[in-house]
Amino acid sequence: MAGPRAAPVKVAPPPFQQFLDAHRVKVYRFLVAAVGSPDADDCFQETFLAALRAYPRLRDGELLDRWILRIASRKALDHHRRVARDPRPVESLPEVSAPGAEPADRALWEAVGELPPRQRVAVVQRYVLDRSYAEIAQAMGGSEQGARANVHQGMKKLRERIG
């Protein structure tokens, strides 16, 4: 007969500044790829403001990287929804590319920038952040099957565009 199971040990979250310092580069890189350089700063601030508000209620500091990327993914999707509602003349659309990207890479980043928001976030999570489909589903608030479908459709569109 097995003995009583020990409750999982929860790790206390570090001070918020330490958490911010540990995860800011990864979150910023994700947001540059997910929303483009011109809007990454605003989404970054929104992400960490939301995290700061929720941080005092956080009881387990074990999977903070997944937690902050889930917030960042949702902020990126919110950004795309907001932009889709705002009319913009074609001449004012920002160029989407990674900072310092070579011309060949620029075409890829432009193609990624033209993906629908959920596909764009899923592709960036999968191939830039090397996240599993389960992690993508958790970050985007959907199912693993939905995450696979978004990555698949996004990659299909990129292959058609890039060749």
Image (spheres, rainbow, N blue to C red):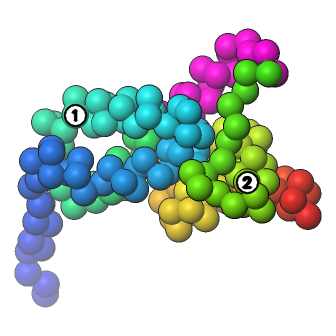
**Prevalent SS, magenta region:** helix
Which residue corresponds to the image point at 12% horizontal and 73% vertical from the top-left?
Answer: 5
**Residue 44 appearing in the image:** yes
Amino acid type of disc 2? Arg
Q: What stretch is highlighted in magenta?
A: 75-90
Few, some or many C-alpha atoms within 10 Å of disc 2 (few <14, some 14-19, many ≥20)?
Answer: some
Q: Residue 52 carries which label?
A: 1
Residue 13 shown left or right of residue 138 in the figure: left
Q: Is 11 situated above or below 112?
A: below
Task: Tell me residue 55's x, y (percent).
Answer: 19, 38
Residue 91 shown left or right of residue 54 in the figure: right
Front residue of this view, candidates 157 and 44: 44
Q: Which quadrant: the N terminus?
A: bottom left
Q: Name the residue under label 2.
A: 106
Task: Tell me residue 13's x, y (percent).
Answer: 13, 52
Q: Is 89 situated above or below 42?
A: above
Q: Does the magenta stretch include residue 7?
A: no
